[in-house]
Image: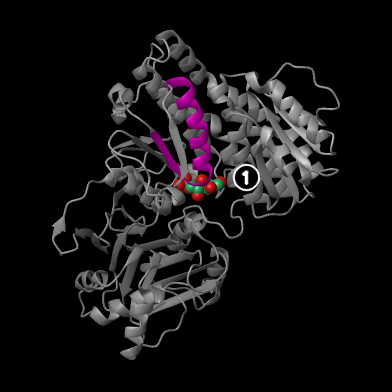
Amino acid sequence: MCGIVGFTGNRAAVPVLIEGLTTLEYRGYDSAGVTLQTKDGIKTVKTKGRIKVLEDKINELGSFDATCGIGHTRWATHGAPSDRNSHPHENMEGTIALVHNGIIENYLELKTALIAEGVEFKSDTDSEVVAHLFSKFYKGNGLEAMMETCKHLRGSYAIAVTCSDNKDEMICTRQDNPLIVGLGKGENMIASDIPAIMSITKDFIVVGDNEIVRVKPDSVEVFDSEGNAIEKEVQTVNWDIQGAQKEGYDHFMIKEIMEQPKAVRNTITSRITDNDMPNLMEEGVGADVFKNVRNIHIVACGSAFYAGMAGKIAFERLARIPVVANVASEFRYSDPIIDENDICLVISQSGETADTLAAMREAKARGAKTIAVVNVLASSAAREADHVIYTWAGPEIAVATTKAYSAQLSVMYLLALTAAKARGTLSDEQIAGYCRDLRDLPDMIEETLGSRETMEELAKLYHERNDSFFIGRGIDYMACQEGSLKLKEIAYVHSEAYAGGELKHGPISLIEEGTPVVALACEESLYEKQISNIKSVKARGAKVILVTNGDFDIDPDMCDHVVKIAKCPFFMAASLSIIPVQFYAYYVGVFRGCDIDKPRNLAKSVTVE
Ligand code: F6R
């Protein structure tokens, strides 16, 4: 998972590449580099560190007159982050440069053969193999060289190459990794994701698996793996670049937390009819999809999986359909019991997560109908699923998801209500009532954003603690898991999410004087049970932050701090309780001096297994 970018046109390439790479930094940020087409041949500048370090290094070297170049921002897999392992990689003669996102599984075999032929390697990466292989096959025609190169590659890749004897040309291809071509006027770009092309255009095409593209300032030609020309549909981005900028906020994460009312509103509004019914007909998801389904298998990773766990509660309790929720990396190797009687519901912000895609393909191969809930337009999951339901959260830049998670939850509710209607498990009046509640949800989220200051104060109080617990039951437990993940990933605090009733079976021994425990109590039928669980941690010295929508009496034996949130239908409660928890994790991270938008060791789009 790295970001690649390329530009060819009639203006200076460096600022365009740097701007593009900066928007892609969420995909990896341990090193970066560019190769520029200059009048003296190709020039590569690369370095360990962030894009800013690269930019400074380029500036130190003076100005480049290049109008064509490729660039890369890296998340290391093969070879530690270092100057020499950074991309682009060149062939031995320094006439060809290549950037790669993905993993070449048979790189060792290829490398051994190339070394035997006399090739000298300069890095420890798998990617450099592709540069030398391409060079071996290059006889002045990039398309032919790329076709031949791909025949030898096993793995996943998005690749872009530029050669010194074709000064304004880029050749690219992909297999299981994202690649788009931005179409400007007299200038074109290639990139891993849409925000990277927005400085020149909103029009783009999505490169399909095994397609090869030749990009010049005035032309973009797409070929299949045999070299036959193919026509592509041009798509247009329907949001503005401001969506991918901080707009005065300190971090993308806090901006994206604050954008959640809008993300949910955009996702649900056109999907609830005037007579208050869920309507996913535009996506082809009507009653027939759920009427006779046997099981729903929800498959996702990380936060998307936790959104799926909340979805499980909605499906089971509203539509009485059994749901199996699986993390994608386990599902795909579990010989899953799934066939044409089942639905595989895939959830993914990026639509490019390798494990999620593989799990979806596994389910599809076994005959299941696939529905993908995806945020990124035209991503792989969106293209491959039988039905795609977009979350209209807009671009999510912070590595830790917030607004996409909230939008995913809202799609879970719409789907569960659609299923309940199809199965007749709720009356039309009940469904209409829930749809009205769903329509009110963005305003309720807005109101819950008012907890920001309180959570900042609590974070200030507890940010030095290295261990934390989140406890909840039912839907609260699902939100706890997401909250705990947020605290781990952005604040580097060891944190456990436990079902309230499960604590006494072991982990309660970890509670000691001063351990912060965030307790959620938003499911009315479980208040009493949860209160007992909370009291048992309080009695052992925990500092309890209670987030609740309950009107019950709160005594000093129960908690140290109370954050009151509004009441909503039980199955939607995670949409509100997660807001203070996100603020808490964010501010703990801020007070601990963490790199909020780019936490260590992580990347936004996990395109490796
Ligand atoms: C956590 C987070 C990750 C992602 C996971 C799946 O904040 O963002 O856990 O949810 O990597 O990514 P997508 O949704 O792109 O498939």
- Judge left or right: residue 54 versus residue 209: right
**Residue at screen point 32% across, 84% down:** 113
From the viewer's side, name the closer residue of 272 and 250. 272
Quarter placement of the N terminus: bottom left
Q: Is mark 1 within 8 Å of ligand 1?
A: yes
Q: Position of residue 458 (x, y in %)?
A: 78, 38
Q: Residues within 10 Å of mark 1 (few under 14, many from 20)?
A: many
Which picture quadrant has residue 424?
A: top left
From the viewer's side, name the closer residue of 542 and 177: 542
Name the residue nearer the viewer: 537 or 49. Answer: 537
* Along the line of sight, the residue nearer the viewer: 325 or 28: 325
Magenta-tinted stretch = 296-319
Residue 602 among magenta residues: no
Residue at the extreme top: 429
Give percent across and percent down for residue 88: 42, 73
Name the residue located 45 percent from the left edge and 51 percent from the top edge. 329
Report how many numbered discs are placed on residues in the image. Answer: 1
Quarter of the figure with residue 131: bottom left
- In this image, 77 relative to 531: left or right? left
Left or right, residue 45 beside residue 530: left
Image coords of residue 42 (percent x, y) = 37, 78
Dividing the picture into quadrants, the one containing residue 544 is: top right
- Residue 312 in the magenta stretch? The answer is yes
Question: What SS does tag 1 mark?
Answer: helix
Report x, y in % for residue 556.
86, 26
Callout 1, which amino acid? Lys
Q: Which residue is mark 1?
A: 486
Residue at the spot x=23%, y=74% of the render?
145
